[in-house]
Image (spheres, grey):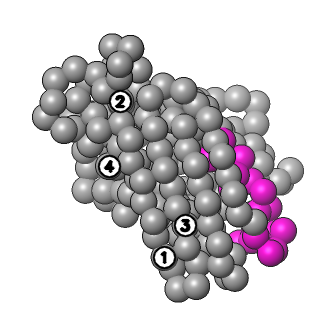
Amino acid sequence: MRKVQLKRTTKETDISLVLALDGTGKGSVKTGIPFFDHMLLAMVKHGGFDLACTAKGDLTVDCHHTVEDTGIVLGDAIRQAIGDGKGIRRFSHAIIPMDEALATVALDCGGRGYLVYTGSFGDLNMGGIHSEIIEHFFHSLCIRAGITAHITFTGRNDHHKSEAVFKAFGIALSQAVALTGKKGVPSTKGRL
């Protein structure tokens, strides 16, 4: 089983995380930000991996550090769990509707972190968090995980747009890191 346990402590946050890529969709997330917990649990459930995450941050300031650092630690865990990348599919995509909202996520788990994020939210404050922090979470995760991600979404309801993005990311990630049974690294370079 590709399982990683990490802990990261700074002056702003204290995060403990256990990630199992070959899981069953079980999640336990406690960040002190209920909306963010809900989004992460949707990603885990639909991605079919297991995640236990506890984050304590300086929420009296705002949610920025907690969300950003959770992305950093989750990205580090994904990168470690992928390892040298032997046998993974590497590329994947998912298109997920949620009522009027539609999210598309295309991923390359090839070792180069990059994010293209196209879409916007109508409300600057969504579920108790600033809407721009959603993009920052995925940026932090992708840079640390070595994932190139293109995330595009449309819709009218901010909750639906956000949830569709998290679900699509989870599904695409699950498919990209899936073991294909092929030997070797899926790269013409011979390494990710």
Q: Is residue 114 above or below residue 125?
A: above
The magenta segment: 121-139
Of mark 3 and mark 4, the one earlier in the sequence is 3
Of mark 4 and mark 1, the one earlier in the sequence is 1
Pointer 2 residue: 82
> Which residue lies most toward the bottom here?
99
Q: Is residue 156 above or below residue 177?
A: below
Give the alpha-carbon distance from disc 2 to disc 1, as whole Å: 28 Å
Quarter residue 20 falls in:
top left
Which residue is located at x 35 percent, y 23 percent?
Answer: 187
Q: Determine whether label 2 and label 3 are within 8 Å by CB.
A: no
Pointer 1 residue: 97
Which residue is located at x 66 percent, y 61 percent?
Answer: 33
What amino acid does circle 3 point to? Ala
Which residue is located at x 28 percent, y 22 percent?
Answer: 185
What amino acid does circle 2 point to? Ile
Give the alpha-carbon distance from disc 2 to disc 3, as whole Å: 25 Å
For label 1, the SS is strand
Q: Nearer the viewer, residue 8 or 119?
A: 119
Mark carried by residue 103: 3
Place of residue 190 in the rendered image (x, y in percent of width and height, measured from the top left):
33, 14
Place of residue 53 in the rendered image (x, y in percent of width and height, measured from the top left):
49, 47
